[in-house]
Image: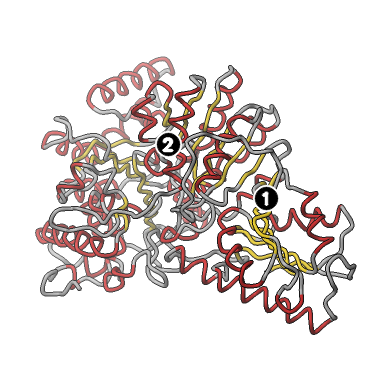
Amino acid sequence: MPTAEDYPILFSIDSPAQLRQLEQRRLPDLADEIRRFLIEVTSRTGGHLAPGLGTVELTIALHYVFDTPADRLVWDIGHQAYPHKLLTGRRDQFHTIRQYGGLSGFLKRDESGYDTFGAGHASTSISAALGMAVASGLSGASNEVVAVIGDGALTGGMAYEALNNAGDLDANLLVVLNDNEMSISPNVGAISNYLARILSGQAYTSVRSGGRTVLSTLPPSVQRLARRWEEHMKGMVMPGTLFEELGFYYIGPVDGHNLNAVIATLTNMRRMNGPRFLHLITQKGRGFKPAEGDPCIYHGVTPFNPNTGKMEKKKGRTYTHVFSDWLCDMAAQDDKLVGITPAMREGSGLVRFSEDYPARYFDVGIAEQHSLTFAAGLAAEGFKPVVAIYSTFLQRAYDQLIHDIAIQNLDVMLAIDRAGLVGADGETHAGAYDYAYLRCIPGLVVMAPADEAECRDMLYTAYRHAGPASVRYPRGGGPGVKEREAMRELPIGQAQIRRHSSGRGAGGVDIAILAFGSMVAPAEQIGRELDATVVNMRFVKPLDEALVVEMADACSLLVTVEEHVVAGGAGSAVNETLGRHHRSVEVLNLGLPDEHLGHGSQQQQLAGCGLDADGIKRRILSKITAMARHRAPRGRGGQMGGQILSA
C-alpha cells in the first residue's frame, strides 16, 4: 500500500483547500507523486490509466486557482478525473476503485461534493456546466463554472449544441479543452505560453473591450471590416476562429503540462466574464513510457507490471472476438458490407476489420446519432451497414433508430455489445434496457444468443434478414461452445427446447424455464437440478408465441429469466403473449431489479441480483413454496387460475 513516506506531499493533502496552501514551486513535485501513485495503484487494481496521467497538471491547476467546490468543476465522463479523486479526499480509498463497494471509476454526486456532475457518457460536460452557470446567474451567486472536455468528446454533437447555446446566452462559463490527440507542436512552447498569458491578461482584455466600445460608435460597415480584420489576424496564429464565432473568448493552445503557464492562464481567465474557451495540449499516458507509446491500449488496463507495463492477459474467447471474426468472414463474402463504430474500434472488435478492409471501415467519433443515420444513408444506396455499438451507447441514438431506420425499413444491422451487466464500469455502462426499447419498434428483429456458436449464427441471420435486425450479446465470454466455420441461418422467431422435463418437477410442479441469451446456461443447470423444461428463447422479437402457449398449456409454472430489467423486458413480452392467448398460468419473471446497480465484477453483480444459478434456483423454489401454500399444484396440462409474479 502507498504510504506518506513514499508520497509526502500527496499525503499532506486531504482537500483542495490544503492544496491551495502549498507554495507554487512545490506543485511539480506533487504532479510527479500523483503520477507515481496512479501507476502503483492501478497496476494492482486495473482501471483507466492513460487519461488521468495526461491531466495531472491540469487537475492541480484547476483546484489551485478555483475555489472548489464552491466553484463548480464539471468533468466530461470520469476517465480523466482520477487525479481529481486523489485531491478531493479519496486518496485512502483509491485502491478500491471500480471494485464492489468501492470508489466508482466515474464521477458520482453521492460519492463526493466535489463531483458536481456525474456522467459515464461523453460530450455532456458543457451542457451541464452551462446549466450551472445560468443557475448561478439566476440566483445571484458569483461562483465560477468550469467544464473540462476531451478532444474525443468534442466530436459529439451535443458538445456543439451546448457551445452554440452558451455563446448565445453569454453565460459566465469557462470551457477547458483537454486536447491529447496531437503531439505538442512547435507553436506550443515558450512563445505560445507567453502569448496566452498576454492574451488573457488584464491589459489586453481592457484594450479589446475598449476597442469594442470605440467600434460601437462607428458606422456598421466599418465595424464589420474591423471585426473581420481582428478575426483574420487571430486566425493566423491560433486555431480558435470557430470558437470565437460561437461567442467564446478563445485562448490557446497552451502546453497543458507546463504548470506555471496553466496556472497563470487560468488565473487571468478567471477574472474575465462571459463564455471563455481554453485550449490545452496534453499527452495521454504522460510519465509512463508504455502508456505514452500506446495510449489506446493503456486507456483502460487490467493489473500490470509497473516496471514493464506488461498486463495480465484476459483469458478465454469473448463474444466480441466472435463478432470480430464473423465480420471479417462476412466481409470476404460480400463487398457491400461496411462496418461502422462510434469511436469504439477496440472495444467493439473492429481492429482486424479496419486493417483488412480499411475502405469499408468507418469510425464516426463519439456521435451515436450520426452513426445510425449515416448507416441508413448507406443502406438507402444498396450497401449493408453493420453498426457495432454498446447497448448503453445505442440509447443515445434511439430517435434515429426509429425515424431513420425502422420507419423506412432500411437494411441496417446492429451488433449490440456489452448487453446486460458490465462489471466495473457500473450503472452508466450497463446494457440493462435494450430489450424494452427495441422490442417496441415495429419491424425490428431482436436476437440474443445462448452461446458463442449461436452468436455467430445469429449475426449471419441478422445480416441475411432484409430489414433492420439486431443481435445483443454480453461482455466477456459465454459457456465456451466453439463456433462452426460454416454460417447457418436460423428461422426467424423460432425458439429451441434445450431440455424436456421428465414430469417429476420440484415440489410436484411442472416447470418451464424460458431463458433469454446469457441466462440459458444457468437455466440448463437449474433445469437438471429441478427437472424443469428449459427453452432457449433466442428471439425477443418476434417472440415464439406458439411455443410459449404450448409451455403454458403443459406446465404449472413458467419462469422467464433475462439479464435485463424486468419492466418492459423479454418476460413482459411473454406475459403479453399469455394475455393475448387467454392463458392463465403461474409466471415468475426474473431479471434485473428496478434500481441502478453499482460497480463490481459481473459475477458479484449477478449474485447480488439473484441471477446467478443459486439465486435463480432459490427464487424458483420460493415461488413453488408460495404456490403450495395457496393451492394444490395441478398436474400436467390441467387448468388453474394463475398469477404473474415479477422479481
When asked about the image quadrant of residue 142, the answer is: bottom left
Amino acid residing under circle 1: Gln
Q: Which residue lies furthest to the front in this view?
A: 502
Q: Is mark 2 on a helix, strand or loop?
A: helix
Tell me what residue is drawn at x 44 percent, y 60 percent. 423
**Front: mark 2 or 1:** 1
Residue 272: x and y, percent? 32, 45
Marks 2 and 1 in Cβ contact (< 8 Å): no
How far apart in space, not on screen, are marks 2 and 1 (Cα)? 25 Å
When asked about the image quadrant of residue 646, the answer is: bottom right
Does residue 461 lie above or below 641 as drawn? Answer: above
Circle 1 packing at 10 Å, graded few (<14), some (14-19), many (20+), is some
Does residue 134 lie above or below 193 as drawn? Answer: below
Residue 498: x and y, percent? 64, 56
Tell me what residue is drawn at x 38 percent, y 36 percent. 248
Task: Give the position of the N terminus as an image quadrant.
Answer: bottom left
Name the mark on residue 599: none
Residue 113: x and y, percent? 40, 67
Q: What element carries label 1?
A: strand
Judge from the rendering whether residue 5 lies leftward or rightward of residue 561; answer left or right: left
In the foreground, 144 or 271:
144
Which residue in the structure is indicated by mark 2? 325
- The image's colouring method is secondary structure
In the foreground, 261 or 394:
394
Which residue in the structure is indicated by mark 1? 496
Q: Residue furthest bottom?
A: 629
Amino acid residing under circle 2: Asp
Circle 2 packing at 10 Å, graded few (<14), some (14-19), many (20+), is some
Q: Is residue 168 visible?
A: no
Task: Give the position of the C terminus as an image quadrant.
Answer: bottom right
